[in-house]
Image (cartoon, rainbow, N blue to C red):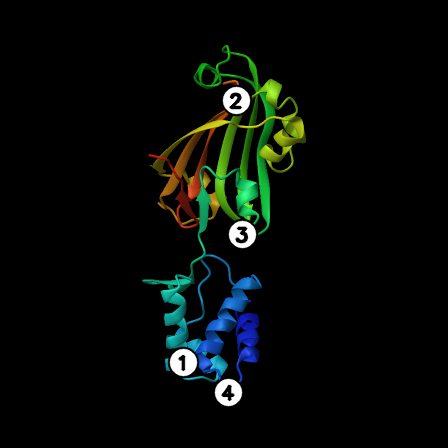
Amino acid sequence: MEQQLLAQMKEALDASVSTPLYLQLQQAIEKAIADKLLTHGTALPSERKMSMALGVSRVTVVKALALLHEQGVVVKKHGKGTLVNLPVHYNLSGGGFSSQLQRKGEVSNRWLTRELVAAPSSIASELDLAEGAMISKIKRVRLVDGMPVSIETMYIPECFLPRPDLLEGSLYAHWREQGIKPYDQDYSLSIYTPSPEEERMLEIPPGSPLMKIILKSQDSKGRVLEYGSAICRSDFYNFEFKVRA
């Protein structure tokens, strides 16, 4: 992949045109991002390697990276070099995961659980149900362009999702087809330390802090539609919300 990246960048450079080489290199890196050769968190080749492979001075590379750094497109991290920085700006009041992140890349799921279960007392009380009532439990790893970015576990009254095994993509898109619409949503955010298994599923280094979101949705009649949590990679998300004072 690195050789393909360097080859594409070298092809984009033309010393005979009036545009300075550092601007051409900046644009070449931006095109590589648009073409998905570079994704969020990807390390760029070192300044020395780019200079040698592209046949340009190291000053040219430094100036191109400086422009990208000013724009927030890349960041420098000690021991890791220059990394592509394209976090998702996720609006907590702006709709579901799929609808927002599909603008960022290809959204997919790695399903862990899709089943009907008897509600334990702690979950039943959150859903305004009797203990032991049947509910749908869905648990999945969410991916963007193949990168695992969060683990979501949701509990839904059976009447709002009687066949969880048939759910393939967006829960909210499925609900729209059924005329079901969240009206009120309550969120709680906290810092979360993942288990070794969660670190493995999210492909993150040990000890990486995550953001945990607890969500409860209700419809316009006050019926609880869902209750659950998502643990999200803090290096991938920027959470946003707007309130009216």
Q: Nearer the viewer, mark 2 or mark 3?
A: 2
Query: Badge 2 local density, few (<14 within 10 Å), some, or many (20+)?
Result: few
Image spot of residue 76 (x, y percent): 35, 63
Q: Which residue is mark 1?
A: 60
Question: Residue sitting at 38 percent across and 76 percent down?
Answer: 63
- The residue most toward the bottom is 16
Q: Residue at 55% across / 78% down in the picture?
A: 12
Mark 2 lies on a secondary structure that is loop
Quadrant (top left, top right, bottom left, bottom right) of the C terminus: top left
N-terminal label among 1 and 3: 1
19 over 180 or under it: above or below: below
Assess whether mark 4 and mark 3 are in contact (beta carbons under 8 angstroms): no
Q: Give the Cα separation between the discs numbered 1 and 3.
A: 30 Å
Q: Amino acid at mark 3?
A: Lys
How far apart marks 1 and 2 lie (CA) works out to: 58 Å
In this view, which residue lies farthest toward the top?
Answer: 130
Query: In the image, what residue occupies the spot 41% across and 77% down?
Result: 61
Instruction: Give residue 48's quadrant in the image.
Output: bottom left
Residue 43 placement, left or right of 108 = left
Q: Earlier in the sequence, mark 2 or mark 3?
A: 3
Q: Which residue is mark 4?
A: 15
Picture disc at residue 104: 3
- Which of pointers 1 and 4 lies earlier in the amino acid sequence? 4
**Which numbered disc, 4 or 2, marks the residue closer to the eye?**
2
Given contact means CB atoms under 8 Å apart, are the residues at marks 1 and 3 in contact? no
Residue 112 appears in the picture as rendered: yes
User: Does 129 appear above or below 212?
Assistant: above
Instruction: Name the residue beneath numbered marker 2.
Output: 220
Q: State the image coordinates of residue 38 (x, y, percent, origin top left).
A: 51, 63
Mark 1 touches mark 4? (CB < 8 Å): no
